[in-house]
């Protein structure tokens, strides 16, 4: 199960890796569905083109985070996933939701955690004078961007970097590291 909010490039990297690396045969695993909190998320069309089921649970349709998370959990549980993967899902999840999927909820964050949790990571890394930045795959806990780290990849911060240029190089590493971390998680829980 993959949750998205936008373009779906990490989701597509995962879907392609699952097919290329034959996760169905190796781990008895597949991408069961893609759910977005935004009906216009471009990643939904990409998933549909790959034959992956999609659904939309719009956060605006619910009066609270708890109500949204309850509806999202219902949509997820229809597929009984072994793993829930956040791939550009831009919502802070409630503790109840996180606890429901404890140990099987993964996220990718565009920094070398614990540095720069939250938003604007590339700008913050450049402003702090960092020589390296990167990406972290971690288990989701109730504390934002602080769960156990499963994998990291380092990306150099170049002297003339802009947040956009750094983001592009980090995203390339995300597409490589996230499927690897998921495959490792699947192999360890198989």
Image (cartoon, rainbow, N blue to C red):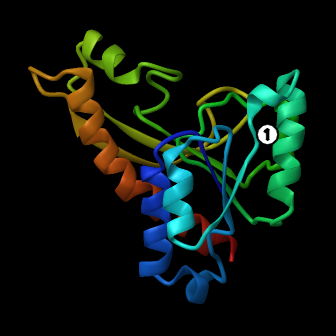
State the image coordinates of residue 175 (x, y, percent, origin top left). 37, 54
Position of the N terminus by quadrant: bottom right
Q: Quadrant of residue 187?
A: bottom right
Q: Nearer the viewer, residue 14 or 156?
A: 14
Picture residue at 88% right of the left edge, 35% below the top: 96
State the image coordinates of residue 54 (x, y, percent, origin top left). 67, 59
Position of the C terminus by quadrant: bottom right
Q: Name above or below for residue 34 compared with residue 115.
A: below
Specify whether residue 181 is in view. no
Q: Nearer the viewer, residue 42 or 179?
A: 42
Please tell me whether mark 1 sits on a helix, a strand or a loop: helix
Specify few, some or many for label 1: CA neighbours under 10 Å numbering under 14, 14-19, or 20 or more. some
In the picture as drawn, the residue positioned furthest to the left comes out as: 160
Q: Which residue is denoted by mark 1 in the rendering?
A: 98
Picture residue at 42% right of the left edge, 51% below the top: 9
Picture residue at 52% right of the left edge, 57% below the top: 45
Q: Name above or below for residue 125 compared with residue 74.
A: above
Q: Name above or below for residue 189 compared with residue 138.
A: below
State the image coordinates of residue 145 (x, y, percent, origin top left). 59, 30
């Amino acid at each position: 199960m993959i949750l998205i909010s936008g373009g779906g490039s990490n989701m597509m990297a995962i879907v392609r890796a699952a097919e290329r690396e034959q996760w169905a045969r190796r781990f008895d695993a597949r991408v069961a569905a893609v759910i977005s909190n935004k009906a216009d998320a471009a990643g939904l069309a990409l998933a549909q083109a790959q034959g992956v089921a999609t659904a939309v649970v719009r956060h605006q349709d619910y009066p609270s985070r708890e109500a949204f998370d309850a509806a999202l959990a219902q949509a997820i549980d229809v597929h009984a996933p072994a793993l829930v993967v956040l791939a550009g899902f831009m919502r802070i999840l409630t503790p109840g939701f996180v606890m429901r999927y404890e140990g099987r909820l993964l996220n990718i964050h565009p920094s070398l955690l614990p540095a720069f949790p939250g938003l604007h990571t590339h700008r913050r890394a450049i402003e702090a004078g960092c020589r390296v930045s990167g990406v972290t795959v971690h288990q989701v806990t109730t504390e934002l961007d602080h769960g156990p780290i499963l994998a990291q990849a380092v990306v150099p911060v170049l002297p003339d970097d802009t947040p956009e240029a750094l983001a592009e190089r980090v995203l390339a590493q995300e597409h490589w590291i996230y499927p690897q971390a998921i495959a490792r998680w699947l192999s360890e829980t198989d």
